[in-house]
Image (cartoon, rainbow, N blue to C red):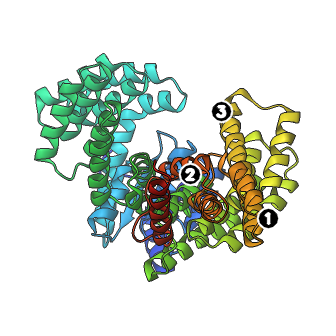
Amino acid sequence: MTEASFNLQGQKILIVDDLVEARSALKSMLTVLGADDVYSATDGREAVEYIMEHDFDLVLSDYNLGKGKDGQQILEEARYTNRLRATASFVMITGENAVDRVMGALEYDPDAYVTKPFTLSILRERLYRLSLLKTILLPMNRAIDQGQIDWAIEIADQIRVEHPRLLLPVSRLQGKLCLKQERYEDALEAYTRVLESRPASWARLGQAVCFHFLGDTDQAVSLIRATLLDHPLYVQCHDWLAKILVGLGKGEEAQRELEAAVKISPRAVLRQLELGQLALTNESYTVAQDAFEQAMRLARYSCYKSSSTYQQFVEAAQHNLDAEQTKENRLLCNKALRALDEMKQEFSGNMGVVFDATIAESRTYKAIEDDNKARSSADKAEGVLARIKEPTGEQQLTMTEVYIDTGQSEKAVNMVQTMKDQGVANKLLQRLGAIEERLSNINAREKSAELNEKGVSHYERGELKDAIAAFDQATRFEEAGISVLLNAIQAKVSYIENEELDVGQLKDCYRLLRRIGSVGHFDERHDRYQRLKETCERLRRSAGL
């Protein structure tokens, strides 16, 4: 077959473009090339529906499709669902010249890439060359479609011998297949064979990946860094370097590599997610927040849309929130709340996700110390949990934690008891124990506060012995705060000054002062602390101690 005789007759073809003129023009060109079975999609959603319903031989998609999925996301989903056969071809058409968009499209391996504007002769030449390659690779691609990967690798050896000019594309595909099968020595051989013929950055990266899996990490890192010196925009080098560095426990270095990769190609949702998760682990909350925000936007019309992305964005944002009423703080809080609203709407049929979003809403309000709204959201979460037929132990524990955070200790205690009655999974016992300890501390603080109020009431009525007795009980709790300790000292000092010089009470005052330690100058209790400390010293001297 020559280029002049190239014909598309009998092939099932899909055109994807949001502009009617562009679809019409492309269909006319394909008709001239013999196409007689052509479908047209006006947007990404319709394109994916067609791909799910039909086995296309050729897909030609514009990159920019307006609102909704773009061409890259169509290709992502076609690969993700395995609805684009290895024997089929995907051609990306775009007028985009921005590096991030070009890199984003190329990362998902379209079979060809055509830039607008193009003529019939350019389209014919591109599809003709692609057809020649696909015809030669047909036996190998059929084996891939049938899941016979090892057989496809053997066929690749035959094709390489019969068509030596196809050394690069065949070896590249063969290397990927060997890596998939964990045949690292064979993959290394394929990449090395290419490099013995000519320099190829992808083959050097392939070698590095093989060395990594074969245990020679130093050699892998050295090769990747050398490749980046020659090709600083080779984004997959940054990706692999990050993976290796994470394995070596060098999380911060790995994060820097992913940040570099995102600058080069920011439209890959999986890379943004990986950066966000690593930054969250590294407690780099601003980086994590930005990465998850981009991932939310990119995944909105993608097969990678997930409720966890929204949650992780809000989790990162919560770390950057505080009670300060700054413009930046308000904007970030509103952004987090909008993300949670979208999460509820997008996954409204899943009560578990709605519950998670409502819990996150309560914690967001808690982060800015809006206790009333935090409590209101907690109440909503309680209502959602009641609608879940069989809530998990994880959900019940989360609800318990939010009860505690919003001052609903009694409900938390009841939930803990309910879980104990039902039986708790071993993996949740440690978390349950931590919750019970928190509740115990809260109970102690509440009991201490109750006894403190009782002591204050006695003190105000001049009942100093009763006041001391109440304060002594309150200060037995380790959770008793500075104010309670100062009240106890005040009652004892008043008793010594007005009733009798009781050495035991005075020693108690010094014990309580040591327990307090010090009170900072900017603390509103500082002056009172100093007065009581000086009074105790005066009484000590009077007692001759």
Q: Along the line of sight, which residue is nearer the eye, 29 or 404?
A: 404
Amino acid under label 2? Leu
Of pointers 1 and 2, the one earlier in the residue sequence: 1
- Residue 519, horizontal then vertical, whole percent: 44, 62
Task: Measure how far apart labels 3 and 1 are at the Cα level.
Answer: 26 Å
Amino acid under label 3? Gln
SS class, disc 3: helix
> In the image, 75: left or right of 448?
left
Amino acid under label 1? Asp
> In the image, 392: left or right of 78?
right
Task: Check the picture and name the quadrant holding the N terminus.
Answer: top left
Q: Residues within 10 Å of mark 3 (few under 14, many from 20)?
A: few
SS class, disc 2: helix
Q: Along the line of sight, which residue is nearer the eye, 18 or 120?
A: 18
Q: Is residue 259 above or below residue 375?
A: above
SS class, disc 1: helix
Q: Is residue 521 above or below residue 309?
A: below
Identify the residue under disc 2. 506
Is mark 2 in CB contact (under 8 Å) with mark 3?
no
The residue sitting at 46% across, 24% down in the picture is 149
Q: Is residue 57 above or below residue 167?
A: below
Q: Is residue 121 above or below residue 304?
A: below
> In the image, 530: left or right of 468?
left
Of pointers 3 and 1, the one earlier in the residue sequence: 1
Identify the residue under disc 1. 379
Q: Which quadrant holds residue 291?
A: bottom left
Q: Which quadrant holds residue 446?
A: bottom right
Q: Residues within 10 Å of mark 2 (few under 14, many from 20)?
A: many
The label on residue 430 is 3
Is mark 3 in CB contact (under 8 Å) with mark 1?
no
